[in-house]
Image (cartoon, rainbow, N blue to C red):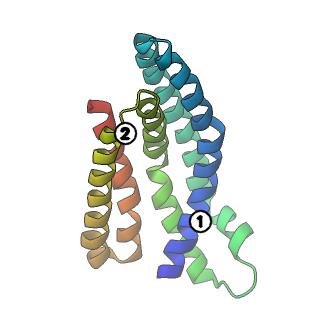
């Protein structure tokens, strides 16, 4: 079971890393410059717009990954000693993780805005809450539903992350 979760997380990390390195890093530099120049109103409006764009882009990526999960897992994992049953579990774990992908990427964009205005204590509090949600959901649902219950912890913590950042 741990192997299936690990492989599902590795597959999830591919689009997350691409998204983070291509979009979020650029935003941090741009928004830091805007904040330094005193454009907090511009930063606020830009953040709302970019979070919605990120949410839309990530939703498309997540939809394609969920739709093609078996093909993706087959292409990357069905070589060597990885059996068909394990591949099916990994595909379901990957799809479950990708359900939260849009929320997680929107939260990632929000994080960059908080960093740009040096509100790192806020991020520390959000991170603590996110960890609590993830661990709690993994423990409770993992005990009841096994591997998929543990996988649900990722989308649940992404939702909590985005919600907390949006209200703060």
Question: Visible in this render: residue 94?
Answer: yes
Quadrant the C terminus occupies:
top left
Question: Visible in this render: residue 163?
Answer: no
Q: Is residue 130 left or right of residue 105?
A: left
Q: Is residue 58 left or right of residue 123?
A: right
Residue 48 placement (x, y as % from top left): 43, 22
The one nearer the camera, 94 or 54, is 54
Disc number at residue 32?
Answer: none
Classify 10 Å Cα crowding around label 2: few (below 14), some (14-19), many (20 and above): few
The one nearer the camera, 153 or 42, is 42
Which quadrant holds residue 11? bottom right
Q: Is residue 96 left or right of residue 26?
A: left
Q: Is residue 17 left or right of residue 132?
A: right
Task: Please give the residue where the numbered disc 1 appears in the rendered image.
Answer: 10
Helix, strand, or loop for circle 1?
Answer: helix
Task: Please give the residue where the numbered disc 2 appears in the rendered image.
Answer: 120
Which badge, 1 or 2, is on the more N-terminal residue? 1
What residue is drawn where x is 29% and y is 54%?
Answer: 128
What residue is drawn where x is 59% and y is 65%?
Answer: 10
Which quadrant holds residue 77? bottom right
Q: Is residue 95 above or below residue 63?
A: below
Q: Residue furthest bottom?
A: 81
Helix, strand, or loop for circle 2?
Answer: helix
């Amino acid at each position: 079971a741990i192997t299936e979760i690990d492989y599902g997380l590795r597959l999830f990390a591919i689009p997350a890393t691409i998204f983070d390195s291509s979009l979020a890093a650029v935003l941090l530099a741009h928004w830091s410059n805007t904040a330094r120049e005193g454009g907090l109103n511009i930063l606020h409006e830009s953040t709302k717009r970019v979070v919605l764009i990120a949410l839309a882009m990530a939703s498309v990526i997540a939809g394609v990954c969920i739709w093609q999960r078996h093909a993706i897992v087959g292409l990357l994992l069905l070589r060597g000693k990885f059996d068909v049953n394990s591949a099916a579990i990994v595909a379901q774990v990957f799809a479950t993780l990708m359900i939260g992908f849009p929320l997680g990427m929107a939260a990632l964009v929000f994080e960059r805005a908080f960093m740009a205005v040096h509100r790192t204590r806020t991020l520390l509090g959000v991170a603590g809450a996110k960890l609590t949600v993830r661990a709690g959901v993994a423990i409770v649902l993992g005990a009841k539903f096994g591997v998929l219950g543990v996988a649900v912890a990722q989308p649940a913590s992404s939702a909590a992350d985005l919600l907390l950042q949006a209200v703060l």
